[in-house]
Image (spheres, grey):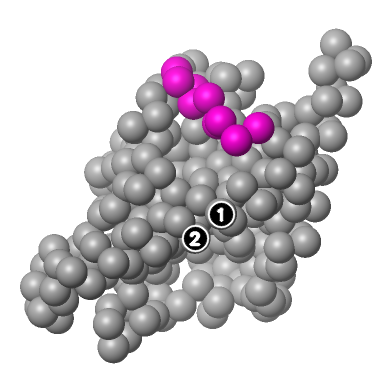
Amino acid sequence: MQNKPANLTVGCECNWMFINRQQAGILLAKQLTQLIAQDEQLDAHKMIVLALPRGGVPVGLEIALTLNCPLNVITSKKIGAPDQPELAIGAVTSNGVVIVDSQLKEFLRVPQSYIDKEREYLANKTKMLEHTWRQAAQLPEDLALQNKQVIVVDDGVATGMTAIAAACSLREQGAAKTIFATPVISRRACNLLQQEYNQVVALEIPEDFKAVGQFYIDFSQTSDAEVVSALTLAKCRQNSDALTH
């Protein structure tokens, strides 16, 4: 890759097909380990891994276990276009942060009243989901991100809307440094996220990007039970390590 930006780390642009999210997470964790070893400003002891549910959680688990970091969730839901719900025109986080693709909103003539209604509904929905998962895994509600180095993880990125909303939320919560890590990302989304995060780490930035699922052999939906199981496993590993040191 020629003239690679300083805040972009790419594993290998070789049209990988990932077996599943776990394998993708293991490969991504190796890439992050190398990055941390090469950058003296990065410190795994000050890091927390925040996964974008649900698909980002199995990927984030492998990263958290490898780096020995806490794992939690940061929920961001896309705002779908009125007549095309799969087309993201924006996104909302649990603390009410909303971002909108103004050009797409104007092109599709989406009224502000629609955005406002979706914001309220999605903020409440994401807040409820986070509470349910964290309570089931016995994790604190407060992420305590002040001065933390945060790795946000997803299983793949098409538009980047949910990841951008997450970045805005992290800034509001005082995160010191933000890294976005994903196995596969579209070129356009990668360019956008480089403006929002201190570092973007990806294994694959394909030119022919139609959907995240095309890069996985097994892209079955991640269940609520799997989310809770991953959060619980990471917490138990952290508690176990704390007792032995």
| Mark 1 touches mark 2? (CB < 8 Å) | yes
Disc on res. 29? none
Camera-nearest residue between 233 and 217: 233
- Determine the secondary structure under disc 1: helix
In this orientation, does residue 124 appear?
yes
Location of residue 106 with respect to 50 vertically, above or below: below
- Going 84% across and 34% down the picture, which residue do you hit? 236
- Determine the secondary structure under disc 2: helix
Left or right: where does residue 134 sit relative to residue 10? right
Location of residue 120 with respect to 16 vertically, above or below: above
Which residue, given by chain and number where applicable, does mark 1 sit on? 128
Q: Position of residue 178 (x, y in %)?
A: 42, 34
Camera-nearest residue between 244 and 112: 112
Which residue, given by chain and number where applicable, does mark 2 sit on? 125
Local packing at callout 1 (Cα closer than 10 Å; few below 14, some 14-19, many 20+) is few
Location of residue 226 (image quadrant): bottom right
